[in-house]
Amino acid sequence: MADVAATGAVSPQPRTLTGVNLMLTAIALALATFMQVLDSTIANVSVPTIIGDLGGNASQGAWIITAFAVANGISVPITGWLILRFGMVRTFVASVLLFTIASAACGFAWNLESLILFRVIQGAVAGPMMPGSQALLVMIFPPSQRSYALAIWGMTTLVAPIFGPILGGYISDNIHWSWIFLVNVPVGVLCAWVCWINLSSIKTPTKKLPVDVIGFSLLVLWVGSLQIMLDTGKDADWFNSPIIVAQAVVAFICFFIWLIWETTEKHPIVDLSLFKSRNFTAGTIVFCLGYAAFFGGNLLMPLWLQTQLGYIATWAGFVAAPAGAVGVIMTPLLARFTSKVDARIMATIACLAFALSYSMRSSYSPDASFIDLMLPAIPLGIGLSMFFVALMTICLNGLPQMQIAQATALITFARLITASFAISASTVYWDRQETVHQTRIAETSGSQTDPMWADALRTLTEGGASAAQASGVLIQEAIRQAYTIAILDIFHICMLVTIGLIPLIWLTRRAVANSGPGGGAH
């Protein structure tokens, strides 16, 4: 930070806000986070509607999601460099404004190609929004209230991916798909204006750092190859496709070259020295794996409900809604305890709540009622209300104030990459386990010599169905049973993963939300 004085920056401990200014700024920062996270999921359920309006097929439509994910995955890790180069407030406000403009462009896209291009831009400029908003929230709250800052961030982060598909489906069904992007315009303008008015006087140290061109190029290559591989691998039959193999090789080689380069470069584009902190390293691992279990399981849940149980998209979303509702209610209530209670205890309770939810889900049946399906979302919401705040407290334990933005960017980046792996792994495992279980069902009860099969056939034919129709009904039921057993296997794995994270939590040092510059004890 030798160049700080030359830049005119002030102390690395910016002043906190109070009163109405604090409340309005916190709301604006939270809305920015909500908007960015929402846009990573809101378009998922709207893809069929979009390609129906703009033309194209399903594989082309998938690029609406992939384009944002790839660009965002590349831009998030360079947030720390951008903030150090241009200042935290300027970087964040510029990101929000550019995201708002890109959102408007997406809403006015005239064909699928233009929409995909604008989604690339939207994902690229969104990189600093989440880590920047969290760092600013921690910065503007006084140390005694820092747990509330993390709670606000946690609420918006956990609610957005749950309500994104519900909101996206409603807008597409009842208004027009373009409004899933245009709705960001007034919100983005308001957030940028409030943040600039209340935060522009806050200066953070800046340095005119050289651009790590090689590090950034390697980052683009390995993250881009990895994200495209994970997003398109299923349709391309994974490693049976030469293209997927080539992408995997490029990602693997470029990652290790990038890792070596970034650890030896004097001015790296990504500060990997943060992993020297035991709390940061262990906390990030727990955060990523816990989030992966949550994201993978909750991705498949609505797919199972819609494809196998006949739920429409909106009601499939409502099954998960209690998790968000409980999280919103409990997060601010628990925030007062995170400033007094060891974050490791909160994280442990969160993992146990996750495990309980996954255990309840692992006992689902194909004829489960709506209430039965919804109940496990309650302990899931309890776990979410503690998990985000506790893990961020552990990860930021004792870090200097001006490393918070770089740390949150790196955590966000690692979480996005892990979530991508979780999405691909869970969908592949679900399909493969369905095949295994369907074979077993066919071997045990799928033969016409089997008494149960014969009785079922007789009942259906006596009810007026032909022999072919009766056999078709039973085969469909076998497929439904197989997919159900397969998703129960996944919930069981999620339960074991979250329980297995508990010992890793206790390898970290004690951390309390308001006891150190970064929100943790020294």
Image (cartoon, rainbow, N blue to C red):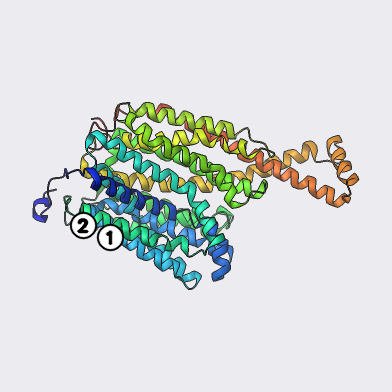
Please state the total of marks drawn on the protein image: 2
Q: Amino acid at mark 2?
A: Phe
Residue 67, position as x, y percentages in the image = 45, 61
Residue situated in front as seen by the camera: 193 or 511: 193
User: Which residue sits at x=52%, y=65%?
Assistant: 176
Q: Which residue is mark 1?
A: 94
User: Which residue sits at x=27%, y=58%?
Assistant: 193
Q: Where residue 375 is drawn, which disc sits there? A: none
Marks 2 and 1 in Cβ contact (< 8 Å):
yes
Height in image: 245 above or below 105? Answer: above
Residue 507, position as x, y percentages in the image = 35, 27
Height in image: 137 above or below 279? Answer: below
Look at the numbered disc 1 and give the secondary structure of its residue.
Answer: helix
Going by the picture, which residue comes out furthest to the bottom?
110
Quarter holding residue 280: top left
Residue situated in front as seen by the camera: 306 or 199: 199
Residue 520, position as x, y percentages in the image = 27, 33
Q: Amino acid at mark 1?
A: Ala
Q: Judge from the rendering whether residue 353 lies leftward or rightward of residue 453; answer left or right.
A: left
Q: Which residue is mark 2?
A: 86
Residue situated in front as seen by the camera: 387 or 400: 387
Q: Judge from the rendering whether residue 122 lies leftward or rightward of residue 8; answer left or right.
A: right
